[in-house]
Every structure is written in structure tokens, then in C-alpha cells.
Image (cartoon, coloured by chain):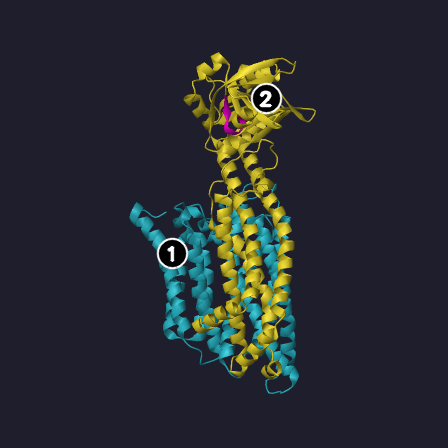
Amino acid sequence: MKINHYLIGFAVSSLFRRGTKSLFVLFIFTALIFLLSSILFISNSIKEELNLTLDSLPQIIVQKLQAGRQTNIELKRVNKLLEFQGVQSAVPRIWGYYYFEKAGVNFSLVGIDAYDKQYKNSFANIVKNVNFDALEKTSSMVVGQGVKKALSENYYKNYFNFIKPDGDFIKVPIASTFSSKTSLESNDIILMPRSLVLEIFGMDKTKATDIVLSVANPEEIPTIAKKIKNLYPDTRVITKSDLKVSYQNIFDYKSGMFLALFVISAFTFFMIIYDKASGLSSEEKKEIGILKALGWKIDDILQEKFYEAFIISFVAFISAIILSLFFVYTLEAPILKEIFIGYSRLKPSFDLPFILDVQTIFLLFFLTIPLYLAAIIIPSWRVASMDADEVMR
Amino acid sequence: MFLTPETIAILILDCIFIVFAFFAFVISINIVKKWDLNSTSSLQYSLEKKAILAATIIKYIFVLKLPLFMFFVFTADKISGVITGAMCAAGVVNSVEFGLWLFVFKIINLFVFGFWIALHVKDMQDEKLSLTKLKFSIFLVAFLLLIIEIAYEISFFASLDVDKIVSCCGTLFSVASASSFSVIFMIPNNIIITIFYATFFLYLVSFFLKSELFFFFSNLVFFIVSIISLILFFCTYIYELPTHHCPFCFLQKEYHYVGYLLYVTLFIGTFSGISGSILSLLKPHHSKSYYKVSLFFNTLYTAIITAYPVVFYIKNGVWL
């Protein structure tokens, strides 16, 4: 099929001649694509950020369940778990959430021990950078950016008073703050010596929150997980791939939910375009009549209408994508971001990492432009097949 | 139901296709029944107008189906990350019983719709519109094929089960598997190479003889033999792994998406050969340019696919 430059020129000038009408359609279409692409960009970025976190997560997590709820696990079990062939290390973790009422937020308290093998790379770095011996001696803590902010807003500049279960206070000085590479994971974290966490939560010294294992050969993870389950039927064994799959499912589900809503608005859009393209002014009818009298065939008029539609949808597509790139990555997606990170009260003000893959662009393309073209097929044909004498009369 | 953004996009487009194809189908029935170019009735006049609408709809569907096919493969690749055991699209497609059929229908439909467009272009050049009745009778069949494909596709996404463990491509495409592929794995390597190059030679002969019927069959055979030899022999050199026979994995990033290049060249080469020779048989004055297009792309395909074992041999000094 040859591309007719004169026809394209005609289409462009025809769009300008009907300025307000084309502008209206262009505006609606751009808004629609903008909304959709922003949601997809945000969801992709958060997914990427979580995947980064996921890489540093332990290979196997063992939790103890009692009456269907997670409870603390006995430290004795660590040695039993180490006896499994292929298990490289087993580290008991002590952590939990501390609710800070004044700010209405949850802090994640994590107990660390400098002599244990660190299960998380980012924590290992902190331990290296911060003088950990001093932390242990002075019983102080390292806090994330978000925690620091929440505390200083409530006038806790240098220390914080934790309330123990029995009502006593523990005064813990802030040694330093840290900003991790991925702020989503570290924003609400407080690192402190293990003994301090045990005291704040009033936990039994012979127990831990859960146990994390690292396995030398990743292929053996499912087998080891099965063996642990057999040895301790009261445990829940979570592997890294379980987490990965559920993350992907959650995000596909969230953007899927949004898309389900999008289908409705897309249908509305379809109706608007159909209606706009069908209702012709007498001016336009006259124009078609003149063109036909000049010898244009139905195919020529159809082709010109397609060029018009293509120009509109292409301009809308490009400008919507540029707009939403600006909105998501420069403005940090002010309102829409909340849809995806609504669960935490300590709203982590993290940066969305820049991700732009071809697949998302293709997805956006298939969700929008075919819809527009489909909406104009029948109206344009109806216009193009009108009889010259009839419309000119 | 397996609802990700990608599957929703595909399903929305499927719905649009069904609705519009149905319009075209109704118009086609009327045309096949009542078309008479010599008549001056208003019925014939409106049929001529409607023929243009139907043709526009079919063009619209085909133009979208081409990239959508690749998008489907891409989506299946992405889903493989979620389904246990699957490592590429092959595992996902085979996790459902009729997955292979869905694929076969997708390829057949690409050929049929592509041929329809070629026929349509030919028809529009002819002032007597002598092919109109034929092309709309062909669409009646194409519509049924399209409906079957979409029905397969919808039930495919509906029956994808995340918790079911599927086989990965390494076991699907091997002698040991019980799948429908396993029979062809009995053929030894040297025979399949001989057959492949013999077919290509036959194809070259048919090109120089310029006989339409011969050219048609040689293209058809070349397409089938190419796919089989690709699975059996050539892809092991793409992976540089003698046991890996998957026709999907080389669509992934690790192999620089070379699969898209291979499949597209093979498709263009054989498609232009097949559709061109059918058109020539129908209309003796058809332009012969399709011979050159077909020759160029099929030779390009053969050159790329031959380069893999040759480069491997030069680098390593042994055959796999």
C-alpha cells in the first residue's frame, strides 16, 4: 500500500479546520491514555523496587504457628535446622512492630547482632559503617529516614522513650540514621541490639520471632523446605520463590483491578467517539459531496479518515506518555501512588525507580489505539459512502 | 480466570474482533448469495458499498493480528514466571491441553487473513471486481477459524492455573516426552539436515522454473520442514546446548530476541510465495515480484539459520 502524502496533508488541514472538535477528542483520548499509563508505570516501578528488596531477602523463612497464628519460635530449633544437609546458615531473627501512637505509625524494630552472619546485605553494610560495638555498649539505635522524621516532629531529636509491656520506659538514644538503596524497605526500620528489642517487646530470651536459612545450592530449597515441614509440623516454611510469585500476583491483581475499571471508561470513550464521528455538520456533508463530485472514491475518503484518526491517536498517545513520564517520575505521582501503597501509616516517601520497557509501551498501544480506530470504522464508512448528489442538494 | 494487564488487553481486542468480524460475516453472506455485478438494482449498489466496509474491517483485524501474535508470545513468556515449572512460553502453552492447537490456529489465521488481504488488493485493481464473490466466500471460512481461535484463547486464559506444576520446554521437546512432538525426534540429525537443504534446493529450482503450482508446494513444504528442522537441529546451536530443543526460548532476551527475526523472515518469505502463487493461478497477469520477495526472505532465513552451526564450528572446532 502506497502512502499518499497529499492525502496526509489534506487530513492534517481537515483536522485544523474542525479545530474545536478535534481538540476535544484529542483531550479526552490523551487524558485516558495518561491515566492508564501512569498506573502501569507506577505499578512497574514499585514491582521493580520490591524485586530489588526480594533479592536481598532470605532464601527460607521458618515461622512457628500456634492456633493458626504466628508465635515466637524456640531458639533450640536453630541447631536442629543446621543439621540438615545443604543448609549453610540458620539465623534466628528478633523483630516486630512498635506502634507510635502520637504519629499513628508503626515502626519495624529489628534486633541485630554484629557477630551473627548477617542475612541481609544492606544490614551488613550498616553494621560495617556504624560502629556496632558502640551501639551495643550505649544501647542506642540506628533509624530509617521516615522514622527520624516522625520522631523529630514529636520533639524526640536525640532519643526516644519506648514503653515496655509492663509500663516502664526505656530511653534509647539515636546513634545515626541510614538511607538504604531502596527506601521502601528501610524507611520505617529501627535497628538496635538484640537484647534491647527483647526487652522492649517483653519477649522470652529463649525464643526468636522467626528463623532464616540460607542454602548453598538454590536447587535444594524445595527439598529442604519439605524436610523442615516434616520435622516440625507446626511451622510455616516460606521460600523466596513463594514470595516472588505472590508479589507478582498482588501487583498484577492490583493493576488488573484498575484495568477492569478502565474497561468501563474505555467503553464510554468508544461511545463518545462513535457519536462524534457519526454526527456530521452540514458543512462536513457538503465537503464530502464536493470531494465525491471531484472524483474521490469511497476508498480515498476512508483512507483520509483513517489518516485523521491515526494522527489524532498518535499525537494523543505520544503526548500522554510524555505527560505521564513527567507525572510519575518527576512529580512522583502525587495521588495515584496511594492506590498501591495504602497499607502503611508511616507513609514512606520513596522515589520511584525509573523503568520504561518496550512491553509496557506495547501494552498501552494495544489497550488504546485499536479502540479508537474501531470506533471510527463504521461512522467513517457511512460518511464515505454517502451519495454525492444527495449530500450536495 | 487469569487476569493480568496483558491478558485483559488481549481479551478486550478479542471482543472487538468478534463484534466487527460478525458484521463482516453477515455482509459476506449477503454478498455470496446476492452479488451480481451486471445488475443495476439498489440492492447491488448497497452491496458494493457494504463490501468496502467488510474489507475495511478485515484489514483492521489483520493489521492488529500481526503484532498481537508477537504480543501473545511475549505475554506467555511473562506468565511463565508465575506458573510453577514453566521457564518460557512453551511451558505455559502446554499447561493447557489445547494450548498447541491455539498456536496452530493462530498461525493458520495469520496465513489466511494475510492471503485475504492480498486477494483483496488484487481484486481492487480489477475494474470488473471478478474476485469479490470468491474473497467473501473465503472470509466465511476465515470467520469460523477466527471464532475457533478466539474461543480457544478465552478458554486458554480461563483455565490457566497458577498452582499447577507444568513441564518445562526441556522435557516437552525431547525424545522421552509423551507429547505430540516426540515422534519427530526419532529422525536422526543428518537426515533432517539433508531434508532441509534438499527442500531449499527444491525451492530454488522452483524459483528458476517459475511454475506457480510448483512454487506454491515448495514454499509450503519449506515452511513445515524449516520449523521441524529448527526444533530438531538448528536451535541446539542457538542455545549451544545439544539437549535443548525449545522453539520459544530463543525469543527471549538471553538470545537477543533472535527468534522474532527468524520467524518473521520465514513468515514473510513463505507467505509471499504461497499467496503470490495462488493469486497467479487465479489471475494469470499477476505481477511476478512476489518471487523475488519470497526468494530474498527465504534465503535470508536459510543464511541466518546456517550461520549458527557454522560459527559454532569455527569457534569450537567441533559439531554439537
Residue at point 44%, 55% (across, down): B260
Label 1 Cα neighbours within 10 Å, binned few <14 / some 14-19 / many ≥20: some
Give the colour in which the image draws chain A.
yellow
Q: Nearer the viewer, residue B113 or A335?
A: A335
With respect to residue A360, does B222 lie above or below? below
- Tell me the element at label 2: loop
Q: Nearer the viewer, residue B144 or B118?
A: B118
Q: Return the x and y of residue A170 as percentages of the image width and height.
A: 58, 14
* Residue B162 appears left or right of B125: right
* Residue B146 appears left or right of B281: right
Query: Which residue in the protein does label 2 denote?
Result: A209
Disc 1 marks which amino acid? Ile
- Tell me the element at label 1: helix
Do the dots labelled 2 and 1 sit on one chain? no
Q: Chain of mark 2?
A: A
With respect to residue A108, does B178 lie above or below? below
Q: Chain of mark 1?
A: B
Contact check, label 2 and label 1, Cβ < 8 Å:
no
Give the colour in which the image draws chain B.
cyan
Over which residues does the magenta segment extend? A142-147
Disc 2 marks which amino acid? Thr
With respect to residue B96, does A388 lie above or below? below
Can the viewer see residue B233 in this picture? no
Alpha carbon distance from label 2 to label 1 = 57 Å
- Which quadrant of the rendered structure holds the C terminus of chain A? bottom right
Q: Which mark is residue B305?
A: 1
With respect to residue A89, does B44 lie above or below? below
Q: Which mark is residue A226?
A: none
Q: Is residue B64 magenta?
A: no
